[in-house]
């Protein structure tokens, strides 16, 4: 009887330890990438930067993001439609290409997430 109780406690503790371990890969979805495109449209650059990895946040300031976005708007007009993101996987990275329509052309917003679910790359590209 005591052996069964000790075994039950051991199994319970093992299950507790396994369930308490942090996940190595955070799940991100196409809706996360679409949210980034919407935030770009709304010029919420600091909120986007809050989702960056530390190295990317050090390299890409909100002011630089605004300069790039202002250039896109000056050349192509306001963003009028955000399409559904297309996802691909490369190693531990999830890459989302979000095709967007501006008044005078198309762009692709590429958002790259690392295994921890942080943005490790962000580009505004000609439509692909």
Image (cartoon, helix red, strand yellow):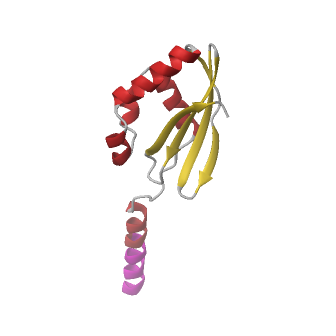
Q: Residue at x 47, y 51 (%)?
A: 114
- Residue 2 location (% of width, % of height): 36, 85
Q: Above or below — where is 52 with respect to 79?
A: below
81 or 17, nearer to the observer: 81
Which quadrant holds the C terminus? top right
Q: Which image quarter: residue 63? A: top left
Q: Residue at x 37, y 81 (%)?
A: 6
Q: Above or below — where is 30 with respect to 78?
A: below
Q: Is residue 2 left or right of residue 115?
A: left
- Residue 106 location (% of width, % of height): 64, 23
Q: Is residue 30 left or right of residue 60?
A: right
Which quadrant holds the N terminus? bottom left
Q: Above or below — where is 112 with respect to 69?
A: below
Q: Which residues are magenta?
A: 1-12
Q: Above or below — where is 7 with respect to 50?
A: below
72 or 3, nearer to the observer: 72
Q: Residue at x 52, y 21 (%)?
A: 72
- Is residue 24 on the magenta stretch? no
Question: Is there any visible trace of residue 82 in the rendered image?
Answer: yes
Q: Residue at x 38, y 29 (%)?
A: 64
Q: State whether the magenta stretch is mostly helix, strand or loop.
A: helix
- Residue 16 location (% of width, % of height): 39, 65
């Amino acid at each position: 009887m005591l052996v069964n109780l000790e075994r039950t406690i051991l199994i319970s503790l093992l299950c507790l330890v396994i369930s308490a371990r942090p996940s190595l890969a955070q799940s991100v979805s196409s809706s996360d990438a679409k949210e980034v495109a919407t935030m770009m449209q709304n010029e919420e650059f600091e909120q986007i930067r809050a989702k960056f990895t530390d190295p990317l946040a050090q390299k890409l300031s909100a002011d630089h993001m605004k300069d790039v976005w202002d250039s896109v708007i000056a050349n192509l007009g306001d963003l009028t439609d955000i399409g559904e993101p297309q996802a691909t996987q490369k190693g531990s990275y999830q890459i989302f290409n979000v095709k967007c329509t501006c008044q005078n052309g198309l762009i692709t917003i590429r958002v790259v997430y690392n295994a921890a679910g942080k943005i490790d790359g962000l580009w505004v590209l000609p439509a692909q």
